[in-house]
Image (cartoon, rainbow, N blue to C red):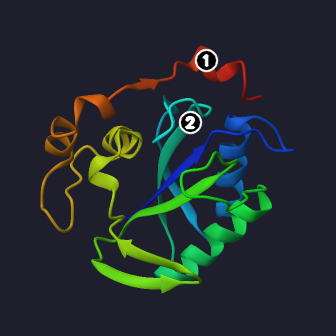
Amino acid sequence: MIYIGIGSNLASSFGDRFKNIELAISLIQKKKIKLIKKSSFYETFSYPNEKDPKFINIVISVESNLLPDQLMSSLIDIEEKLERKRTKKNAPRTCDLDIIDYNKKVMKFKFSNLNLTLPHKELSNRNFVLYPLREISPNWTHPVTKKNIDLLIKNLKNSNNEITKLSQNDISRHVK
């Protein structure tokens, strides 16, 4: 199974953070990538600057015949369509798409000017990845450390643990 993290903390010309995520999913499906499951929406503070707008995040599971670099190319194309501007690291953005896990592969690859690692090298430290991932894949284990998702969540640093699973009422006000 392939897992993709999707986040947004800025509106685009297409709409708010929720609309950006829904549009990203729609564009992913148009690239011959089959959506299997989608987590709930989660809201977190921006990192490392908590004064930046809060993020909305989800994780989706997908199936695809695309190779990791082909998938990454498709995801970056979608980010650009959703008006992502790559300025500085961790800057606010309309859309952020990350390959979290690609069929349990462990590898490094270069894409454009990005050095990428599978599974995503920071996933064990990111509450906004772990909580939605556990929701859609409660038995998931890290391909490198072999730790299950519950243990990874338990090991999160408390300061990095503030996350809110949004209710359907929260979402309904935004997504039509």
Residue at image position (57%, 19%) is 168
Instruction: Characterize the local packing of mark 2: few (<14), some (14-19) or many (20 or more) Cα atoms within 10 angstroms.
Output: many
- Residue 98 x/y as whole percent: 50, 61
Q: CA distance from mark 2 to mark 1?
A: 14 Å
Could you say where residue 140 lies in the image, as x and y percent from the top left?
Answer: 24, 53
Residue 153: give x, y in percent of width and height.
22, 39
Above or below, 167 relative to 42: above
Left/right placement of residue 161 relative to residue 33 reads left
At label 1, the amino acid type is Asp
Look at the image and tell me in which quarter the N terminus lies. bottom left
Give the residue number, with chain letter if any, for mark 2.
Answer: 55
Q: Residue at 75% of width from left, 64% of height from top?
A: 80
Mark 1 Cα-neighbour bin, 10 Å: few <14, some 14–19, many ≥20? few
Query: At numbered mark 1, what does the secondary structure look like: helix, strand or loop?
Result: helix
**Residue 38: x, y in percent?**
50, 45
> In the image, what residue occupies the spot 49% across and 33% down?
40
- Viewer-closest of 85 and 15: 85
Where 155 sits versus 44, above or below?
below
Q: Quadrant of the C terminus?
A: top right
Residue type of the residue flagged with mark 2: Phe
Q: Is residue 95 left or right of residue 46?
A: right
- Residue at 76% in and 38% down: 11
Question: What secondary structure is found at the residue carrying circle 2?
Answer: strand
Is residue 122 placed above or below 45 in the rendered structure?
A: below
